[in-house]
Image (cartoon, helix red, strand yellow):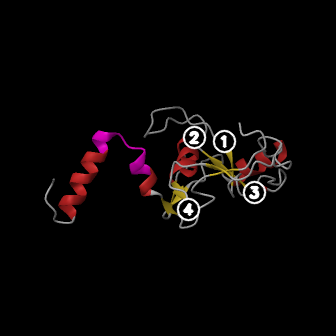
Amino acid sequence: MNSGYTIESNRDNKELSPGQYRLASLKKNKRVVGRVVPSKTTWTAVLTRAANQCEWVEGKLRCQLKEGDIDPVSGGTVHLTADHSTPHSIAPNTDVNNTAAWLALCSRHQIVKKNYWDNTTGKLNVEAIVQNASKKLKQKILTYLQKFFGEKSG
């Protein structure tokens, strides 16, 4: 918990690399009072709009996993959670009664959006994904890229 201090990441400040964080100021942000969640009425309306399915859209495909489904990627049970349409770090005072301010996302896409999605381009943040990969996977990626660009492995 950041106790009201503004902590920036690459999503807030493009001078930072993925995985880097910076305390923006020693002055406490009095507007931040903790995690903002939609009201019960708003969350019900969001779930109705979403047809009780994950609203994540990639390309033209929507996730559509429902509460209680088994996620075919992770193997876990799907739980839909409220997600801010605009990151909390940018809009900490999201209107709890505005359905347009909220998305219903499954846990996997909640994580993807938080860690690996670039809101400015609407594309995956491949650099962050590679930075968080294991050394073995990074080596595999390097070998692939060297082959792709016609360079010899060194």
Magenta span of residues: 129-137
State which tag comes first along the sequence, 1 or 2. Answer: 1
Q: Where is residue 20 in the image (x, y as percent from the top left)?
A: 54, 49
Residue type pointed to by label 3 = Ala
Q: Where is residue 104 in the image (x, y as percent from the top left)?
A: 66, 48
Residue type pointed to by label 4 = Glu
Q: Is the magenta stretch mostly helix, strand or loop?
A: helix
* Magenta-span inclusion, residue 130: yes
Q: Which quadrant is the N terminus positioned in?
A: top right
Q: Residue furthest top?
A: 76
Q: Do the residues labelled 2 and 3 touch (CB within 8 Å)?
A: no
Circle 3 SS class = loop
Asked which quadrant contains residue 150, the reply is bottom left
Nearest to the eye among marks 1 and 3: give it.
3
Circle 4 SS class = loop
Report the side of 81 relative to 29 (left or right): left
Q: Are marks 1 and 2 in contact (CB under 8 Å)?
A: yes
Residue under numbered circle 3: 91
Residue under numbered circle 2: 107
Residue under numbered circle 4: 15
State which tag comes first along the sequence, 2 or 3. Answer: 3
What's the mark number on residue 81?
A: 1
State which tag comes first along the sequence, 1 or 4. Answer: 4
